[in-house]
Image (cartoon, rainbow, N blue to C red):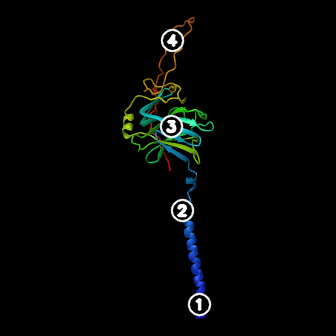
Amino acid sequence: MADGATSAHPIRRRLGTAVLLLAALAIGGAISNYKPSPETQQRPFLTSGGVNDTVHTRSFDARFLGVRGGEAIGSGGILHESKGVWIIVKVRLTANHEATRIFYAALRDGDERTFEASGRVTQNALGGRNLQPGIPVDMEFAFEVPTEVPLKLSLRLATDSVDHRMDGMAEIDLPITRDDLTKWKTDKNPMTILRPVVAGASTSPTPASVPGSTSTPGATSSPSTTSSPQSTSSPRTTTSPRVTKSPKATSSPSVRSSS
């Protein structure tokens, strides 16, 4: 009997060790599954808001001002048509603590795809305007999207063009409906993208805009200059810039998948 009891102790010890080992593995697996991936840990600090909100990020504040769309944009004297639809979003941006620039602008659709600001047209707001702390600047960003793009659409803005890890990013939900996209696709009047301008100042379209383009609310013309009474000159004839269609003016909007 004694020998049998003695031989049973090692078996119980081995069973106890196995149970503890299994429990440790289970706990380790649970901890591993709970721990976020590096991609999740380093994701941008996203601040979201609606059309009536001021969205605050670490570097800048953003507020929605308006959105419009159409089938074509005039830029650099060339008419840029789209197989999809052009969308121009206007926002008011203010740097917080130090001078900064916006190098990333994209639309995010209902399928979580992103459409970055188009490189087919001149985008003066994208990296071209230095935002000074406390001075609000109105900017417009242009995008190409498919006509049947899944809704809803949101605007995303950041200061870095590529590396968004641990960066502040603003997201604004846009009030765009399916009817808006359908209407804009049939609008043949070419649009122009306004230059960045300090809030409250007059705005003007980019150079060599397309004649006949749709006007943008809020744009004011500069006062005319009066000539000196003693100076005389023959009248000068001004002509509107000629617009030519680029052989590759029509293209499908590019899309980038987003995790």
Q: CA distance from mark 2 to mark 1?
A: 42 Å
The amino acid beneath tag 1 is: Ala
Please give the residue where the numbered disc 4 appears in the rendered image: 236
Q: Which mark is residue 231?
A: none
Q: Residue at x 57, y 77 (%)?
A: 18
Q: What's the residue at 59%, 43% (across, down)?
A: 58
The residue that label 3 is drawn on is 63
- The residue where tag 1 is placed is 5
How far apart are the alpha carbons under marks 4 and 1?
Answer: 117 Å
Work out how far the residue at label 1 is from the one at label 3, CA to CA, in angstroms: 79 Å
Q: Mark 1 or mark 2, which is nearer the start of the sequence?
A: 1
Element assignment for label 1 = helix
Residue extending furthest right?
98
- Label 2 SS: helix
- Residue 65 picture location, percent across and down: 48, 34
Q: Residues within 10 Å of mark 2 (few under 14, many from 20)?
A: few
Q: Which residue is mark 2?
A: 33
Q: Mark 4 vs mark 2: which is more N-terminal? A: 2
Residue 40 visible (yes or no): yes
Secondary structure beneath dot 4 equals loop
Which-is-in-front pick, marks 4 and 1?
Answer: 1
> Furthest residue to the bottom?
1
CA–CA distance between discs 4 and 3?
43 Å
Q: Residues within 10 Å of mark 1 (few under 14, many from 20)?
A: few
Which mark is nearer the camera, 4 or 3? 3
Q: CA distance from mark 4 to mark 2?
A: 75 Å
Q: Position of residue 60 (x, y in %)?
A: 57, 39
